[in-house]
Image: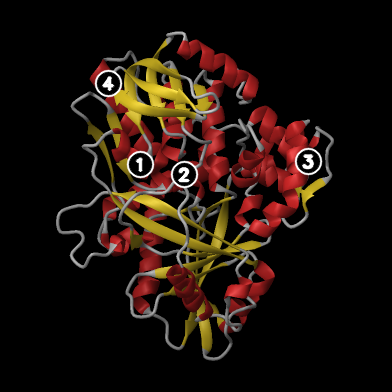
Amino acid sequence: MNSSLNARRRTAELAEVAAGQVVDVLVVGGGVTGAGAALDAAARGLSVCLVEAHDLAFGTSRWSSKLVHGGLRYLAKGEVGLAYESAVERGILMTRTAPHLVRTLPQLIPVHGRANTLVHAGLHAGDLLRRAARTPSSVLPGPRRVSAAEALALAPGLRREGLTGGLLSFDGQLVDDARLVVALARTAAGLGAKVLTRVRATALAGDGALVREELTGVEFEIKARAVVNSTGVWAGQLVPSVRLTPSRGSHLVLRADTVGLGGTALTVPIPGESNRFALLLPQSDGRVYLGLTDEPVQGPLPDVPEVPQSDVDFLLDVGSSVLQRKLTEQDVIGAYAGLRPLIELPGAKADGRSADLSRKHAVLESAEGVITVVGGKLTTYRRMAADAVDAAVRRSGLPAGPSRTTRLPLVGAAPHHALSAVDAPQRLVARYGREATEVAALGMPELVSESTGTTAAEVVWALRHEGALDAEDVLDRRTRIGLSPNDRAAALPAVRALVGD
């Protein structure tokens, strides 16, 4: 079946479920775990419908650090199983399922004075995890010490005074987290899954859901043999028995030339903390993300969280601590925050800090028979999705075998050596993989955003094939132009014109 998502397909498939068609699995939530669950179920031969109240990757899944990491922080906290799980899932993404969307990211811990031997030992322990997960060193080289001269060559913006060298390691970095979600949803659609955005679930039961089509306000029931609630931090709004402790992770968006970074990220120790770091993460579009915070959130949960001034001040201070040039608010071109759906474990929050809560995930079954998957992190979405579908299959007796997603390539995927031979601009290959030739073949190279290099062809592709329904979907989730308000405002007229056409 065609993997393209667009308004015409949405209308047809919406009509089918509204008319009473029963699906094997109804997935609620269009983030990375929900899209992953839809793909996992469809790959087992089950009929699937995914509903999302807003757009694909509207919630937490677009507000990450864009890292596919090996769990080094969890190793430092003694969570060896969680760290190993992260390393395994990182390897799957980088070598099998999405090598076109994940690149090898060098990360430098600058050393001013004497090197921290514990940190150095931790990096080598992380490399042992990489080996245990069987990720080749050609993909993720081992860590090593570098001289002060090499550290400056990797990151010219480093503070020179007292610089004695650095510790260099390697991890995985997504070209964009929202693109991963779209690729998952499209791959699921190619296997027959119905992917319906702007459809809000208002009530869940073990055999379906009451939903409202947000563009018209029409309400109807979707019937299903199993229901998976993958709405992340909002899961408790649909299944009140689910209890979470939300945590806010904020990032600032800067220009790479302001910070003085090339392609190497900086890992910055947080003063007064052990095993906590901030990150300066260079992006392929010339931006740098500075993050991230880890603060508990109280009260009602907003659809789009705001970054408080306290987070801005904290991140600028920590980032400036290793740079030659002090960062100020004038350097910030954008900011974003995501809410993590953390599970509070007994004794894990002794000092009230969300940083001490586990990143493990859980699959829960409500009294009504709804399967809810919560916790976890972006890197381990596939395992979370597989566990949720396993539970749905067991509960409902669905005719399905084990998960097949460890070796199922996402749309556009190809080995790195094959991607280098794709006849299309490198920027498009990095975002679309094998499909870059089809994007380029649209013949619309004119820019809609000079700052990010986004072309008109990418806007049209998002509308015809990636499920975008309006200019906001294109700007804020398919291209990420919107991470900078000024860039967004500059591109909005051209994008709206293309959407109108």
Label drawn at residue 456: 3
The answer to whether residue 342 is left or right of residue 140 is left
**Residue at mark 2:** 59
First in sequence: mark 1 or mark 3? Answer: 1
Outermost residue, left side? 346
Between 180 and 335, which is closer to the camera in this rendering? 335
**Residue at mark 1:** 234
First in sequence: mark 2 or mark 3? Answer: 2
Task: Work out how far the residue at label 2 is from the one at label 1, CA to CA, in angstroms.
Answer: 9 Å
Task: Work out how far the residue at label 4 is from the one at label 2, CA to CA, in angstroms.
Answer: 24 Å
> Amino acid under label 2?
Gly
Circle 2 SS class: loop
Expressed as whole percent of the image width and height from the top left, the position of residue 348 reads: 20, 59
Task: Work out how far the residue at label 1 is from the one at label 4, CA to CA, in angstroms.
Answer: 18 Å
The answer to whether residue 12 is left or right of residue 384 is right
Outermost residue, bottom side? 161
The answer to whether residue 439 shows anywhere in this view is no
First in sequence: mark 1 or mark 4? Answer: 4
Q: Are marks 2 and 1 in contact (CB under 8 Å)?
A: yes
> Amino acid under label 4?
Gly
The answer to whether residue 198 is left or right of residue 459 is left
First in sequence: mark 3 or mark 4? Answer: 4
Expressed as whole percent of the image width and height from the top left, the position of residue 280 reads: 54, 67
